[in-house]
């Protein structure tokens, strides 16, 4: 018999100008999640707010994904702003000197 566990599968969902990222992101799941987010960014005709409130992990692969999204958005003329960033992810970005490159990450 298999135990039923609450799903923490990572997801990217767009509602209007909000791109919500939820679940647990790790090295195995980040590539697919990055691709889904890139598809949303490519189809966006408006600036987007990336809501990280439902993100359950703070990992370097998350920062890498967000930086990839940031570069793609800039090349498409779309501005990404981040909200709901956890303290752990903020700290990781600051330690990596990336907090100023991701709008909404700066603690200033």
Image (cartoon, rainbow, N blue to C red):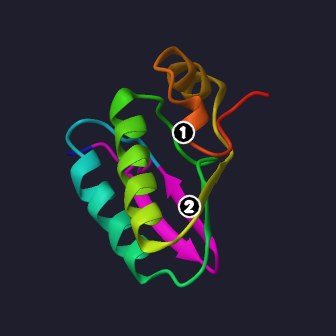
Instruction: From the viewer's perspective, tell me whether residue 29 is left or right of residue 50.
Output: left
Nearer to me, 76 or 5:
76
Report the disc number at residue 93: none
- Residue contact at pointers 2 and 1, CB within 8 angstroms: no
Query: What is the x, y in percent for residue 50?
Result: 58, 57
User: In the image, is residue 26 above or below residue 36?
Assistant: above
Name the residue: 46% across, 19% down.
96
Instruction: From the viewer's perspective, tell me whether residue 85 is left or right of residue 43.
Output: right
Badge 1 is on which residue?
A: 101
Badge 2 is on which residue?
A: 20
| Mark 1 secondary-structure assignment | helix
Name the residue: 36% across, 46% down.
65
- Spot the residue most to the top: 95
Nearer to me, 45 or 15:
45
Label located before the other in sequence (2 or 1)? 2
Q: Which residues are magenta?
A: 3-22
Nearer to me, 42 or 40:
42
Name the residue: 38% across, 77% down.
42
Mark 2 vs mark 1, CA separation in Å = 19 Å
């Amino acid at each position: 018999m298999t135990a039923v566990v609450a799903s923490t599968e990572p997801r990217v969902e767009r509602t209007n100008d909000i791109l919500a990222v939820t679940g647990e992101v790790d090295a195995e799941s980040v590539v697919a999640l990055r691709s889904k987010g890139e598809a949303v960014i490519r189809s966006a005709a408006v600036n987007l707010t990336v809501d990280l409130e439902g993100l359950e992990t703070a990992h370097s692969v998350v920062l890498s994904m967000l930086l990839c999204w940031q570069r793609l958005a800039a090349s498409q003329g779309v501005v990404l702003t981040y909200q709901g960033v956890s303290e752990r992810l903020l700290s990781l970005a600051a330690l990596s000197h990336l907090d100023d490159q991701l709008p909404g990450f700066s603690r200033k």
